[in-house]
């Protein structure tokens, strides 16, 4: 059978592919250190698990929920939106989804027609461009540089904006770079988008994972005009170590949210009932374990960053948030005679059994992504192996 063009043109997720390859080699008995996965390595906090168990015992998890989420879950999101953004929203401004990834998918399916353009800063999370293409839109890339802390400017946006520009994606802290935009930088982008009637897609999934005294400014909090022109994407996966529970949400214009809800009703039906019960506890319950996890990531970052930055041929900007390093390894590749980052990553895995993610999937052919959501022991051993690989591959 001939498959559809949309599937045959779809690029596979490099993060999931790298993770799968690492697991395959581990299953063969190899001592693989995987720094590929975009999830915390902690168990979900006990108070959240207990809330889910009580929901099961009470029978509340046995049935379909509304396609856009339960009233109780929406009430929890209303509460945290007021706290974190200083904005009051109503249930019609909210959809709860099967992960923040599906919130993005439903959004692009809702707002894009064939040929509509979405501006995507580079480096970017691997699924942004593919989801835009699945909605028959065109991703328009704006490249940022490591020397500029991987931030784009309004001048760059002016250069790429056309009559077909429908939206712009902003993520702060960013996956894969961990970059945080300042309030002034976000205000300039937000006012630019309002002025040109370009919808802002604010991916805030890492907004609580911030380190070393840095602070996050939520773009949507900067003015009522910017808020009305923004769709916020968030969820519980990263902050609360709930990747497997698959709960995300979007906040935006009621018309957009209705469209997204229609997409959800014809695809996933509804987000998982018991996961919504757990997510309510995550958002509104005690936050002690979430803070302990954040502190652990901060400790790992401060320990591993200087060691990776000291690797031969590596340039690295210290992240401010999320849980990734995104080093430029062009010098290391040149030392070994490599002209392709994916080949370098594959050889590292085969020879030293360290799994990283190629930067090509993020739009950066000279970089790799390393997750520090692994034990300190594994992180330190990984650096030893990477150094040995670089030294042994020198021409």
Image: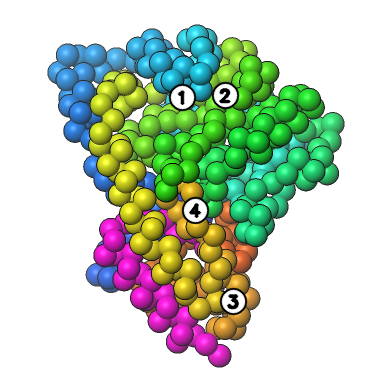
Instruction: Identify the residue under disc 2.
Output: 221
Tell me the SS state at disc 1: helix
Discs 4, 1 touching: Cβ within 8 Å: no
Q: Residue at x 55, y 76 (%)?
A: 313
Q: Is residue 175 above or below residue 164?
A: below
Q: Earlier in the sequence, mark 2 or mark 1?
A: 1
Q: Secondary structure at mark 2?
A: helix
What residue did someone put label 1 on?
A: 84
Circle 2 packing at 10 Å, graded few (<14), some (14-19), many (20+), is: some
Q: Residues within 10 Å of mark 4 (few under 14, many from 20)?
A: many
- Helix, strand or loop for disc 4: loop
Q: Look at the image and give the residue range highlighted in magenta.
A: 368-395
Q: Nearer the viewer, mark 1 or mark 3?
A: 1
Q: Quadrant of the C terminus?
A: bottom right
Residue farthest bottom in this picture: 395
* Residue behind mark 4: 319
């Amino acid at each position: 059978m001939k498959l559809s063009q949309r599937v045959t043109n779809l690029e596979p997720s490099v993060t999931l592919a790298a993770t799968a390859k690492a697991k395959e080699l581990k299953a063969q008995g190899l001592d693989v250190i995987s720094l590929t996965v975009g999830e915390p390595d902690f168990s979900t906090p006990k108070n959240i698990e207990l809330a889910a168990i009580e929901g099961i015992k009470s029978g509340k998890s046995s049935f379909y929920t509304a396609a856009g989420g339960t009233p109780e879950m929406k009430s929890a999101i209303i509460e945290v939106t007021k706290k974190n953004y200083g904005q009051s929203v109503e249930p019609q401004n909210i959809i709860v989804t099967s992960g923040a990834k599906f919130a993005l998918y439903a959004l692009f399916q809702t707002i894009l027609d064939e040929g509509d353009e979405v501006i995507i800063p580079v480096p970017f999370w691997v699924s942004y461009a593919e989801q835009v293409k699945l909605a028959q839109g065109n991703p328009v890339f704006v490249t940022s540089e490591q020397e500029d802390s991987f931030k784009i400017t309004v001048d760059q946006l002016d250069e790429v904006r056309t009559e077909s520009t429908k939206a712009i994606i902003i993520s702060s802290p960013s996956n894969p770079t961990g970059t945080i935009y300042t309030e002034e930088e976000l205000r300039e982008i937000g006012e630019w988008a309002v002025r040109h009637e370009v919808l802002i897609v604010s991916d805030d999934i890492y907004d609580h994972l911030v380190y070393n005294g840095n602070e996050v400014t939520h773009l949507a909090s900067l003015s009522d005009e910017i808020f009305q022109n923004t769709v916020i994407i968030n969820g519980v996966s990263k902050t609360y170590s709930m990747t497997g529970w698959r709960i995300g949400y979007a906040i935006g214009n009621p018309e957009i949210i209705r469209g997204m809800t229609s997409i959800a009703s014809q695809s996933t039906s509804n987000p998982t009932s018991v996961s919504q019960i757990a997510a309510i506890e995550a958002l509104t319950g005690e936050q002690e374990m979430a803070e302990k996890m954040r502190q652990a990531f901060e400790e790992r970052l401060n320990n591993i960053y200087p060691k990776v930055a000291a690797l031969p041929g590596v340039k690295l900007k210290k992240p401010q948030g999320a849980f990734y390093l995104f080093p430029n390894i062009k010098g290391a590749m040149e030392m070994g005679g490599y002209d392709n980052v994916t080949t370098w990553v594959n050889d590292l895995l085969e020879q030293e059994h360290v799994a990283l993610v190629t930067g090509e999937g993020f739009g950066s052919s000279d970089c790799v992504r390393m997750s520090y959501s692994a034990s300190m022991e594994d992180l330190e051993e990984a650096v030893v192996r990477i150094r040995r690989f670089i030294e042994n591959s020198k021409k």
